[in-house]
Image (cartoon, helix red, strand yellow):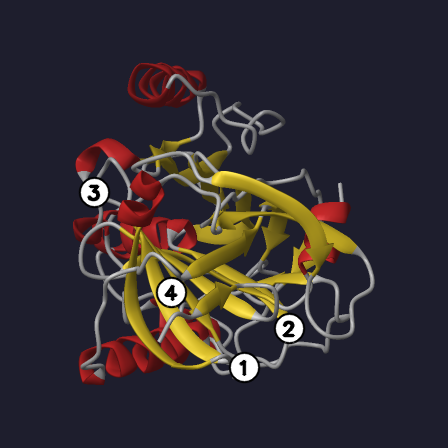
């Protein structure tokens, strides 16, 4: 049986995302979605819940009301105000949040907490002004988990029908050890272009892979996958003649949300100066590593605290991946060109 190996080759990109008015991105560009439910026709797209976490903190603990701007409505703010994703959907040991006047006391608090909780430092806040002239809302989501058994590394092959460049795969084939089949359960298999599996881990995290050419919002794709899984009545066992092939995935991104930058929040002294989110994702045959940060850096008018049949499960063409810990994904990725993602650094 073939073995599944997910590795992440480093990719650095600076993408600008918008909720309702996305410009068409190049086919190979990875576009960061501000919301799990954001609809675009971009081919490679990703969402992670860290920016929603900082927005929730801004709403619940700083402004203590839905966020509105003095210069009129914002589609992105309205959607984020719905709080589709919350920290209750994660375990306490996988995230950290903080907010307050951006002074050296807050910096020391964040640095100490990140080191104690994750043995990490913040890449996002290194160049921030800590003189006390700004107000900061910050979040980090950190995941590092292993598959039940390390998958076999497979040979490099092309990804998709049109891409000529070969990418590294992992999975299960006829030569793989029997124990590797325990790593995989079938969610459904309807035909060679419509199937999904779950890769089991040693922790509580689930890795769901869905083979489809559909290009809906990531939340709609997730709902479709779960509906098909609920309706599936055949065996969910990964059989001895089944095979699996998954590409290594590795990328880094730094994203801004310019449509809310420069906006002043109603009934506060806060103007959003920077709305930032970073993602560092790696998946290989052993497991998954994810580090994501988000920050709202706001200028204050006054420097005081703010009130208020055997089947081939080959993921060698367009597919979507979801990472889940409790009831809802905290990470989603649609891959239309694996070679392009792994190539960019």
| Disc sitting over residue 10 in the figure | none
Q: Residues within 10 Å of mark 2 (few under 14, many from 20)?
A: many
Give the Cα separation between the discs numbered 2 and 4: 36 Å
Tell me, yes or no, whether the two marked residues, 2 and 1, touch with CB atoms within 8 Å. yes
What is the CA distance from the residue labelled 4 to the residue labelled 3? 40 Å
Q: Residue at x 63, y 27 (%)?
A: 127
**Which residue, given by chain and number where applicable, does mark 1 sit on?**
215
Give the image location of residue 116, x and y in percent: 30, 15
Confirm whether residue 279 shows in the render.
Answer: yes
Tell me if mark 1 has few (under 14), some (14-19) or many (20+) residues whose alpha carbon lies within 10 angstroms of its own: many
- Judge from the rendering whether residue 345 lies leftward or rightward of residue 267; answer left or right: right
Viewer-nearest residue: 95 or 341: 341
Query: What secondary structure is found at the residue carrying circle 3?
Result: loop
Quadrant including the C terminus: top right
Viewer-nearest of discs 2 and 3: 3
Task: State the CA–CA distance, disc 1 to disc 3.
Answer: 28 Å
Q: Residue at x 38, y 54 (%)?
A: 49
Residue, disc 3: 204
On the question of residue 252 being in view, the answer is no
Q: Is residue 174 left or right of residue 318?
A: left
**Displayed quadrant of residue 111:** top left
Q: Nearer the viewer, mark 2 or mark 4?
A: 2
Mark pair 2, 3: CA separation: 29 Å
In the image, 179: left or right of 315?
left
Q: Which residue is mark 2?
A: 43
Measure the C-alpha gap from mark 2 to mark 1: 7 Å
Q: Which dot, 4 or 3, sits closer to the camera? A: 3
Looking at the picture, how far across and down is residue 310, in whole percent? 39, 70
Circles 1, 3 touching at the beta carbon (< 8 Å): no
Q: Earlier in the sequence, mark 4 or mark 3?
A: 3
Residue with the mark numbered 4: 266
């Amino acid at each position: 049986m073939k073995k599944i190996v997910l590795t992440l080759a480093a990719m650095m990109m600076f993408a600008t995302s918008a909720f309702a008015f996305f410009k068409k991105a190049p086919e190979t560009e990875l576009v960061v979605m501000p919301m799990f439910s954001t609809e675009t026709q971009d081919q490679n797209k990703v969402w992670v819940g860290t920016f929603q976490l900082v927005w929730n903190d801004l709403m619940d603990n700083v402004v203590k009301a839905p966020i509105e701007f003095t210069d009129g409505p914002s589609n992105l703010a309205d959607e984020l105000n719905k709080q589709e994703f919350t920290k209750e959907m994660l375990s306490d040991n996988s995230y950290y949040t903080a907010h307050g006047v951006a002074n050296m006391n807050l910096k020391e608090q964040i640095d100490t907490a990140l080191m104690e909780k994750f043995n990490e430092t913040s890449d996002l806040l290194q160049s921030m002004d800590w003189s006390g002239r700004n107000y900061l809302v910050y979040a980090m989501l950190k995941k590092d988990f292993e598959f039940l058994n390390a998958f076999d590394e497979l040979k490099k092959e092309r990804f998709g029908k049109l891409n000529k460049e070969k990418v590294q795969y992992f999975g299960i084939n006829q030569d793989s050890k029997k124990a590797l089949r325990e790593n995989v359960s079938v969610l459904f298999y309807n035909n060679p272009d419509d199937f999904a599996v779950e890769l089991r881990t040693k922790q509580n995290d689930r890795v769901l892979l869905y083979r489809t050419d559909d290009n809906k919002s990531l939340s709609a794709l997730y709902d479709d996958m779960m509906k098909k899984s609920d309706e599936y009545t055949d065996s969910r066992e990964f059989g001895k003649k089944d095979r699996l092939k998954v590409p290594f995935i590795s990328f880094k991104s730094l994203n801004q949300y310019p449509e809310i930058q420069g906006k002043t929040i109603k009934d506060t002294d806060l103007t959003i100066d920077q709305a930032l989110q970073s993602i560092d994702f790696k998946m290989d045959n052993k497991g998954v590593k994810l580090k994501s940060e988000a920050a709202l850096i706001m200028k204050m008018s006054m420097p005081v605290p703010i009130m208020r049949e055997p089947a081939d499960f080959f993921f060698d063409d367009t597919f979507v991946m979801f990472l889940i810990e409790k009831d809802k994904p905290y990470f989603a990725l649609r891959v239309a060109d694996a070679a392009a993602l792994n190539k960019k650094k």
